[in-house]
Amino acid sequence: MRRRPQILPIPLWLSGTIFLGALAFLVLAFLWIGYPSRTRDLFPDQRREVGITWSTTYAKSLGISSIVGLQASIQELKVQHVRLPLYWSEIEPQQGQYRWEEVDEHLDLLEKNHIPVTLAVGIKVPRWPECWLPSWTNMLTVVEREQVLQDYLREVVAHTGPRKN
């Protein structure tokens, strides 16, 4: 009876080296081909816009005025579209009491500059932590929480719906 040759396992350092080499090859090939610059040739009539997600809470955590920071982004970056997260915990800190001042100030600025806005609304919106539930919802059941979330969404649509942008 013939014995099959024994195959030795590849050492971990060798497999890691092979992986990194292959990854480096792919990155260099990607850059050499010039994919980012050639997409313009593939879609010549497609409009390109510079857009940002503007987080009021993140601006505050950096110690800057959110409205001043947004204005600077519009002027310096030539922003053409803004996604604005509406954090439920900040807009409705107590059930049925809404704070629209900051939202209105940002939407007014964007409207004045003719910049379209996409509102990110709900529990899960951009920035860490992902979920922005008001603390008063902690005592609610799942069904009750769903109901107050729907009420919040209706309020957001009613308040922001008539705007042009």
Image (tube, rainbow, N blue to C red):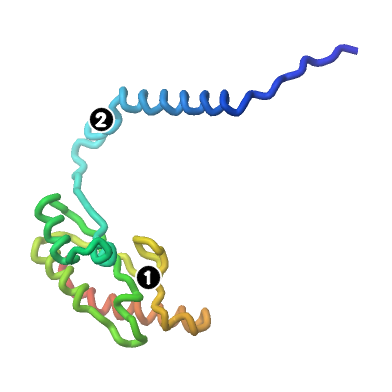
Question: Given this view, does label 1 or label 2 mark the residue nearer the observer?
Answer: 1
How dense is the environment of label 2, judged by Cα within 10 Å: few (below 14), some, or many (20 and up)?
Answer: few
Residue depicted at x 70% and y 20%: 8
- The residue that mark 1 highlights is 122
Q: Position of residue 71 (x, y in %)?
A: 12, 61
Q: Residue furthest top?
A: 2
Choose top left, top right, bottom left or bottom right for residue 43: top left
Residue 42 shown left or right of residue 76 in the figure: right
At a point 47% along the width and 27% down the height, the residue shown is 20
Q: Residue at x 26, y 57 (%)?
A: 53
Residue annotated with mark 2: 38
The quarter of the rendered structure image containing the N terminus is top right
> Label 1: few (<14), some or many (≥20) within 10 Å?
some
Give x and y (percent) for residue 46.
Answer: 21, 42
Is 158 or 135 nearer to us in this picture?
135
From the viewer's perspective, tell me whether residue 41 is left or right of residue 25.
left
The answer to whether residue 106 is seen in the rendering is yes
Give x and y (percent) for residue 87: 32, 71
Residue 119 seen anywhere in this rendered image of the structure: no
User: What whole-number distance in Å separates the C-alpha atoms at marks 1 and 2?
Assistant: 38 Å
| In this picture, residue 91 sits left or right of residue 131 | left
| Quarter of the picture holding the C terminus | bottom left
- Earlier sequence position, callout 1 versus callout 2: 2
Query: Along the horizontal axis of the image, is 26 left or right of 157?
Result: right
Amino acid identity at mark 2: Arg
Q: Is residue 125 above or below residue 100?
A: above
Q: Nearer the viewer, residue 54 or 16?
A: 16
Total numbered badges shown on the rendered structure: 2
Q: Taking 100 as reference, is 51 above or below it?
A: above
Q: Secondary structure at mark 1?
A: strand
